[in-house]
Image (cartoon, rainbow, N blue to C red):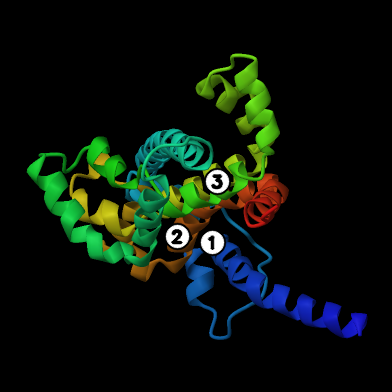
Amino acid sequence: MNVLIYTLLTLWALMVLFPFYWMVLTSVKSYSAYNSEYIPQMFTLSPTLENYLEAFTVVPLARYFVNTLIFTVATTAIMMAVTVLAAYAFARLNFRGKNAAFVVFLSLMMIPSELVVITNYVTITNLDLRNTFLGLILPSVTSVFYIYLLKENFEQVPDDLYYAAKVDGTSDLKYLFKVMIPICKPTIVTIAILKVIECWNSYVWPRLVTDDENYFLVSNGIQAIRESGFGRENIPAMMAAVVSISVPLIVLFLIFRQKIMAGVARGGTKG
């Protein structure tokens, strides 16, 4: 039975990883070698990095990387502050209408994000924030799901710790930073990593609110390469650009994969 399970898992892993392998393989083939292949080759004996250089010179991909880094770091930092404070308020503070407010807040998860894109676009346009980092960041600084996930995690911390801290005269804010955050660190790290991945892959919103290449993100860069006609003609260079954009997220996931799994499992376990 174990042999069958591992065989199926191996086949599934090969199916999942093959597109990544093909993307990397294509990115290191020369343009002439790629076009001369009547039958696609599964390996190359003469790899080249010329496509990577070409991908970064056709469009200012390095600038898009910097823009994406600014957008990702700022958005994640603000969202983490909002998420931690909101989750703590719902999990530990007592105030009138808390349960009703949380039910209403949670019901927002039922609304598809596509439905609020137009509203956000009109708001950002009226505030004259198009083609600005602030316009890119503001609609992404909160997440109902992440607040809910962290609230469930906070509620797993025994109430006795909170009451003991209050007896010692500890403020709620100090208790949050000294007790709750260290205990729930795996979930907080997981949320931060997932938000980084979400921001790095963001496509629809940046395309809507930016038409100035000084504010383009890497997703805009890939589209710019494709729309210029260069990407459709020079597939190896296009794949080189895609690999360059994908590598940071792959490395991030490989480094923190255990924390991500542990954080999701902890956040989804009650008691």
Query: Closer to the camera, 38 or 159?
Result: 159
Left-right relation of 189 to 32: right
| Kind of residue sitting beneath label 1 | Ser
Q: Position of residue 123 (x, y in %)?
A: 14, 47
Give the mark, 2 or 3, whose residue is nearer the N terminus.
3
Estimate the spatial distance between the alpha carbons at disc 2 and disc 1, rounded to whole Å.
6 Å
- Estimate how packed mark 3 is, as few (under 14), some (14 to 19) or many (20 or more) residues with alpha carbons within 10 Å: many
Q: Label 3: which residue?
A: 150
Residue at x 71% of width, y 50% of height: 262
SS for callout 2: helix
**Residue drawn at (17%, 60%) of the image:** 118
Mark 3: secondary structure: helix
Q: Identify the disc placed on residue 237.
A: 2
Tag 3: amino acid: Leu
Mark number displayed over residue 27: 1
Q: Is residue 45 left or right of residue 226?
A: right
